[in-house]
Image (spheres, helix red, strand yellow):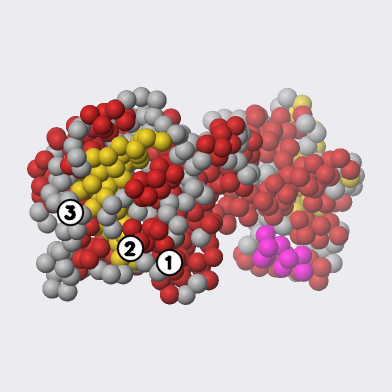
Amino acid sequence: MSRSARRRHARSREPRGHWRLLALTLTVVFAALLFEGWTVHEVDAAKSRLPCTRPAPKAVDESGPVLRRISGDDVESSAMPARTVALTFDGGPDPVWTPRLLDLLRRHHAHATFFLFGAQAARHPELVRRILDEGHEIGSNTYTGADLGSSSRVRTAMELTLTQKTLAGTAGIRTDLLRMPLTTQVDTLCGAEWSAARRAAANGYVLVAADRPDRDPKYGMVRQFSQTDLAYAETKDLLGNPHADRFTTVTDALGMPSADTRVSTAERWQGRALIWTTTAGHAFTHAMIWVLLVLGVLGVLRLVMLTVFARAHVRRLTRFRPGAPWLREVDAPVTVLVPAYNEEAGIESTVRSLLASTHPYPEVIVIDDGSTDRTADLATWIDDPRVRVIRQPNSGKAAALNTGLAHASYDIVVMVDADTVFEPDALYRLVQPLAHPAVGAVSGNTKVGNRRGLLGRWQHLEYVFGFNLDRRMFEVLECMPTVPGAIGAFRRDALLGVGGVSEDTLAEDTDLTMALWRAGWRVVYEESAVAWTEVPTSLRQLWRQRYRWCYGTIQAMWKHRGALLEVGTAGRFARRGLTYLTLFQVVLPLIAPVVDLFALYGTLFTDPVRSVGVWLAFLTVQLLCAGYALRLDREKLRALWSMPFQLFVYRQLMYLVVIQSVFALLGGTRLKWHRMQRSGTAATEQLRQPVAARELSSR
């Protein structure tokens, strides 16, 4: 990156508005899910009625089924006239049985009162309008069918108010009739139900109970039905009863004014807004069920693919090993480029580990990119003829690598980060796959040096289970997207053929790798070439590092999108590698916060045992795959204990990094270059684990 480009990066501001948009989106989604869960799934809990602690008042027990006024425990009630039946249907509207009941009533020239659930009315507004258009009456059965006797005053108010708003939005009416859920005859208005009934009456409702089902219609009756096949059959029988002359609504039978009154335009729009919200929430939850299913299948498929292809990679390891009958041993001199900017904490360990390599001819070029500390001096003081130090004004990592490439003496070039410590045989093993003439670059095996803390353990798992297991799969599929800057070997003519290291993106290693594929070169993974790197030790540093990686990777993917239409090696790489990156490293993280909210919704409102069971099953599969990855890398399995905690903190951070990166790119923001503070702990960890390293290198 040139100095002018760095100044542009430094002047630009990171996007802020998208965080407000994300917070608003998640808030709206959470509110919609909360409302959907309360109105749909919480109903089951609300339908369990508490036993009566005291009987209904005597005045109620002896009253008619229609309670018109309530004063204390005194009521003014009405009963149906002789040979008059008020047909009433609870619940619904039901998309199956409500139309059939309406057809049945029309054939018999009868009318009825439909006590509707507000939640159902919001989903089937056309049925609400049909009920009114055909001369029937509508009453409230509350919004969700909750037991008002066991509901709080706040919930009771919401049950009644939301139903009225829904009726206003669907049909432009409000109703004065109420049938309390889970009640039948007036004697069921006992205990807590009676208290709730008095509160509803105080708000102007006329409460409608029912007569006993075995009452003779010749005495007049209020008949209560649900909306089922049995109710349909019983209604059909009742309509043919010779003891009844008239089948009508509750208010018509009693000569009362209509219970359905028109509402204002403002109330209608409020109701429509509620219906739209309900419809959107319902559609969203159903869509998310399919999204979760698809993502779950993709997630499991990805884990299976990683494991299967890792096993395939192990079986084909001998193809590029020294001594293979069709490949020569690579012992040619190697130029190692070490770009460094303010890396005094680790530069000496990095250079000395390279000089201690078992490869016979290493040339180490340290390119000091305008450091303000002692980086260049420490590299110079090593005083080894195999080490050259080049000083240049601060221009960025890509420019530093190109400077080193221009001074490279040999045809094989290895690029190394200045915080990386090589195993003694890493350099030798890294260059062996270059014996194959089609291979233009080789990725080494990067391990986390400072893995002591929880954050270090999480990154250690990510490197082994994520990065390195991915690289095994990428090599088998021939679509390796990145040779990491920490450890990678290249043919010098391949690098020069693609114009060196590009400054177009902040992920210069990914950009370079993709360019090599498009130029027709193959890129492979050498898992036995081990280097130890230092990872961030704070969430702030980790955020900055991953933000730059992700931002640059998406830049590189966009830059090389044209490879999707190409043929041969380039097209194969793009259609496999870019598709994989797009799906699992961009699209999935973008929708992951909403998916997590929906998973929480499932735990709270649907089946918590099933939701937790699915989560535990997926975690188990991840642990098994991670254990296999650790075993392949000769790492201890005890690091797995931290993996469940990683899903709650670390994963969320990585998702937010992707969201930030995508919004930054869409907004045209130029990302600032962030440098991590080094402590030089990679060398310490490398020396602390000589046994594991020797076991790996001996494979």
The quadrant of the picture occupied by the C terminus is bottom left
Relative depth, front residue between 576 and 118: 576
Name the residue carrying label 3.
428
Q: In this view, does 308 lie above or below 529?
A: below
Q: How many labels does the image show?
A: 3
Is disc 2 in contact with disc 1, using a CB cutoff of under 8 Å? yes
Q: What is the x, y in percent for residue 443?
A: 30, 55
Q: What residue is at 34 percent from the left and 48 percent from the top? A: 407
Q: What is the x, y in percent for residue 439?
A: 30, 66
Q: Is residue 468 rendered to the left or right of residue 692?
A: right
Mark 2 and mark 3: Cα distance apart in space: 16 Å
Q: Is mark 3 on a helix, strand or loop?
A: helix
Name the residue carrying label 1.
519
Name the residue carrying label 2.
440
Indicate which disc, 2 or 3, sits on the residue closer to the N terminus. 3
Magenta range is 93-103
Q: What residue is at 47 percent from the left and 75 percent from the top? A: 567
